[in-house]
Every structure is written in C-alpha cells, then in structure tokens.
Image (cartoon, helix red, strand yellow):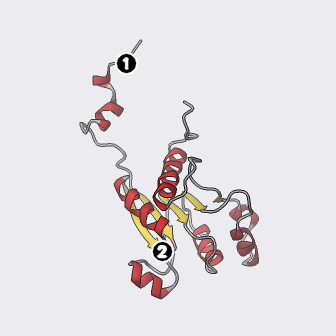
Amino acid sequence: MAQNPESDPTCDVAHGKAEGGTAERTLVAVFASPVAEYLLRYGRDLGFTPVLVDPDPERARAAGAVTAVPGLDGTADVVVTDHHREELGEVLRDALAQPARWIGVLGNPRHEGPHVAALQALGVDTADIARVHRPVGLNIGSRTPPEIAIATLAGLLADRNGRPGGFHF
C-alpha cells in the first residue's frame, strides 16, 4: 500500500513545510586545503557549525583558521584533509583525546595511512588509533576537491544515520 506523501514527514522537510536536522553538529576540517574549503562550505548548508584548524600560524592566519583542535564533544566530526603534513600525528592525538563522534583522514585506501606510524610514535593507544577512519566518504570515484567533499559529507551523514550509503536500501 502506497503511503500518502501528504502525511510523510520526510516529504514535508523536502518540500520546506517542516524543519529537519536541527541537532547541533560540528564539522572540523583539519589543514587549510581546497577540500577543507568545500567541506566547510557544503557542511554549513547541511547544518554543521564549521571549524577550520591549521596548526601552522601563517596558514591559519591566511585561511581564518584556529591553530589547535578546539574542545570537541559527541556532536563533532573531524576530517583531516592532508595526510602529508608533519603535524598529522599531533593533531590527531589531540582530537582522539576528546569524545568526538567521528574522526577520519583522507587518503588512498590501498596504502596504510601515515597517521598510524605518527600516532604510534607519539605513544597513542592502539584502540584509539583504530578510531581513525580511513578511507573516508562514499566510494563515488571522487577526484576533485568538491567531489571529495561531497563524498565525505555523504559518508558522514550515512554513518550518523546508521546507513551504509550507496544505492542499497
């Protein structure tokens, strides 16, 4: 039996008749990069409070970023957008010390991420290292910064909503 779309709350949100997704959420993009720019731009439209972190004072000043991971709670999703930066381990260690909902690092899934060795060198517990997601986002063949941001945000939303992502319902 088909559901009456006039009484479907999801349809009401889609048609602007009701508010959806009003819970406070924070999206922390680590390292000023083109992907971070798109993540935060699109994330704002999805209801996230955007925060850009770059530990390099000059880069932070130029990008309007903060230089340290702020206080995070269970509403925060953290995405590290550059796995080649030497500050990778310290930034992840600081994020892992807090109850962030989700922490991930962009990178090629065919290679072990450099974050593992960086965190091990800092003495971070194996269980905490396992909290770092890699790869991040849905596998849609992303190549450009906007595509990577969309795939990442879609993956965060799927994870937050307990869904696998993709076209399987």
Quarter occupied by the C terminus: top right
Above or below — where is 106 with respect to 91? above
Task: Please identify the residue farthest to the bottom as the structure is shown.
Answer: 58
Residue sitting at x 59%, y 47%: 139
Q: Specify the quadrant of the image occupied by residue 90.
A: bottom right
Q: Position of residue 10 (x, y in %)?
A: 36, 33
Above or below — where is 13 with respect to 46? above
Question: Could you say whether the residue bearing mark 2 is in a helix, strand or loop?
Answer: loop
Q: Specify the quadrant of the image occupied by residue 45.
A: bottom left
Q: How many numbered circles does the render carry?
A: 2
Residue sitting at x 58%, y 40%: 164
Near-viewer residue (129 or 149): 149
**Label 1: how many residues lie within 10 Å, few (<14), some (14-19) or many (20+)?**
few
Above or below — where is 88 with respect to 25? below
Residue sitting at x 42%, y 69%: 51
Three-letter residue code for mark 2:
Ala
Which one is earlier in the sequence, the residue at label 2 or at label 1? 1
Residue sitting at x 38%, y 52%: 46
Q: Which residue is mark 1?
A: 3
Say which of marks 2 and 1 sits in front: 2
Task: Please identify the residue farthest to the top as the structure is shown.
Answer: 1
Q: Position of residue 7 (x, y in %)?
A: 30, 24
Near-viewer residue (89 or 128): 89
Which disc is residue 32 wearing? 2
Quarter occupied by the N terminus: top left
